[in-house]
């Protein structure tokens, strides 16, 4: 059973555009992380959100954790080619396991 | 501070063989987790070790095993390799719940 659904699966946009990717679940998570992965490398942690309704900003990236701690979104403003990569969300359950979504592959064209 | 080191980076094995992958976590991190990543299945949790004890285990057959040493270094072993075991194997270390530092992975190809 896939606990985390990410959408869209693929996204191709022009440099300068804004975008939002989503991470949804029917399960409640104690915390949720977003990672970016480039080809041939491991995922790199971008942010951890813990509190329902929490919003965190990392330069042009804005992360939001849903009030019920079941979903999250990542918004990128004025995307750049360097933002290209696979964006993964991962949720931690109280049992101590992390579950990853299948990811959103983002391509930003110059 | 050195990151998570995985060796080897690339490996080609024949069906039926066994393989051992190694992971050195960030100094001070006692938790090491292993994941399998394939295009079709995404990141699948294999197991987590903490202070030399397996704390969690994913839904993989018994051919997949692991261990952790007293210095927190970890190894995973896959016996009787199958073509479907071809994947990127990622190791991640953590000092607390929530948020991993991943290594660059070992790309295993089974032929």
Image (cartoon, helix red, strand yellow):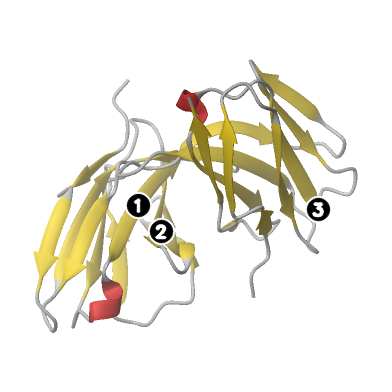
Judging by the rendered image, the residue that carries numbered circle 2 is B35
Q: Is residue B21 left or right of residue A108?
A: left
Tag 1 subunit: B
Chain to which mark 2 belongs: B
Drawn side of residue B100 relative to residue B32, left or right: right
Say whether residue A24 is visible. Answer: yes
Q: Quadrant of residue A27?
A: bottom right
Which quadrant of the rendered structure holds the N terminus of chain A?
Answer: bottom right
Please report the residue visible at 84 percent of the width from the left and 43 percent of the height from the top: A66
Mark 1 and mark 3: span between their CA atoms? 26 Å
User: Looking at the image, which is closer to me, B19 or A35?
Assistant: A35
Q: Image height check: is B36 above or below B51? A: below
Q: Quadrant of residue A63?
A: top right
Q: Quadrant of residue B6?
A: top left
- Cα–Cα span, label 1 and label 2: 5 Å
Q: Is residue A4 above or below residue A40?
A: below
Question: Residue tagged by mark 3?
Answer: A70
């Amino acid at each position: 059973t896939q606990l985390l659904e990410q959408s869209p699966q693929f996204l191709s946009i022009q440099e300068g555009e804004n975008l939002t990717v989503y991470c949804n679940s029917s399960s409640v998570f104690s915390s949720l992380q977003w990672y970016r992965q480039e080809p041939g490398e491991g995922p790199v942690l971008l942010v951890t959100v813990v509190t329902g309704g929490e919003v965190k900003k990392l330069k042009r990236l804005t992360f939001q954790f849903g009030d019920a701690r079941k979903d999250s979104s990542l918004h990128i403003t004025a995307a750049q080619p360097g933002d290209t990569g696979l964006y993964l969300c991962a949720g931690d359950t109280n049992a101590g396991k992390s579950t990853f979504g299948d990811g959103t592959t983002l391509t930003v064209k110059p | 501070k050195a990151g998570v080191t995985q060796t080897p980076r690339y490996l080609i094995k024949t069906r039926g063989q066994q393989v051992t992958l190694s992971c050195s976590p960030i100094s001070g991190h006692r938790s090491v987790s292993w994941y399998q990543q394939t295009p079709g299945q995404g990141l699948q949790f294999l197991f987590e070790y903490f202070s030399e004890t397996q704390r969690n285990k994913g839904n993989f057959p018994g051919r997949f095993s692991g261990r952790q040493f007293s210095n927190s270094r970890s190894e995973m072993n896959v016996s009787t390799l199958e073509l479907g075991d071809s994947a990127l194997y990622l190791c991640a270390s953590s000092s607390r719940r929530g948020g991993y530092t991943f290594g660059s992975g070992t790309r295993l190809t089974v032929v």
